[in-house]
Image (cartoon, rainbow, N blue to C red):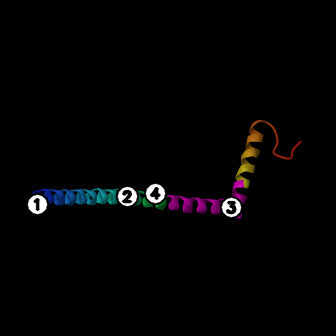
C-alpha cells in the first residue's frame, strides 16, 4: 500500500505543478496581450490629439479667412481663364 500512496502523491504533485505551469503561461500571454492593447490605446490617444489639433486649426477664423480668400482667387482666375467673370458678375 505505501507504494500506491507514493505514486498517488507524486501524481497529484505532478498535476498541481502542470496546472501552475499552464496558469503561468496563460498569465504571461495575457500580460503580452495587455501590453499590445496599451500600445494601441496610446497610439489612438496620440492620433485623437493630433485630430483635435487639426480641427482646432481648421476652425481658426484666420485660417478660414485665408482659405476663403484662396478659394475666391482660384474661382476668379478660373473664371478669367474660361472667359467668364468672377462670382457676382452677370
Distance from label 1 to label 4 (Cα)?
A: 57 Å
Q: Which mark is residue 2?
A: 1
Residue that label 2 marks? 30
Q: Which mark is residue 40?
A: 4
Q: What is the secondary structure assignment of the residue under circle 3?
A: helix
Residue 28 painted magenta: no
Q: Position of residue 73 (x, y in %)?
A: 73, 49
Q: Main secondary structure of the magenta part?
A: helix
Q: Is residue 64 left or right of residue 28?
A: right
Counting residues from the N terminus, which is met first, the one under dot 3 or under dot 4? 4
Counting residues from the N terminus, which is met first, the one under dot 1 or under dot 3? 1
Task: Mark 2 vs mark 3: give the one in front.
Answer: 2
Task: Mark 1 vs mark 3: give the one in front.
Answer: 1
Q: Which residues are magenta?
A: 44-67
Q: Residues within 10 Å of mark 3 (few under 14, many from 20)?
A: few
Q: What is the secondary structure assignment of the residue under circle 1?
A: helix
Identity of the residue drawn at 72% across and 50% down: 71
* Callout 4 touching callout 2 (CB < 8 Å): no
Residue 63 painted magenta: yes
Task: Mark 1 vs mark 2: give the one in front.
Answer: 1
Amino acid at each position: 500500500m505505501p507504494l500506491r500512496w507514493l505514486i498517488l502523491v507524486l501524481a497529484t504533485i505532478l498535476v498541481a505543478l502542470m496546472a501552475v505551469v499552464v496558469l503561468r503561461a496563460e498569465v504571461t500571454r495575457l500580460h503580452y496581450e495587455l501590453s499590445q492593447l496599451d500600445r494601441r490605446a496610446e497610439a489612438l490617444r496620440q492620433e485623437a490629439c493630433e485630430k483635435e489639433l487639426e480641427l482646432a486649426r481648421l476652425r481658426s477664423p484666420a485660417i478660414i479667412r485665408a482659405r476663403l480668400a484662396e478659394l475666391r482667387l482660384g474661382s476668379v482666375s478660373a473664371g478669367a481663364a474660361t472667359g467668364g467673370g468672377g462670382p457676382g458678375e452677370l
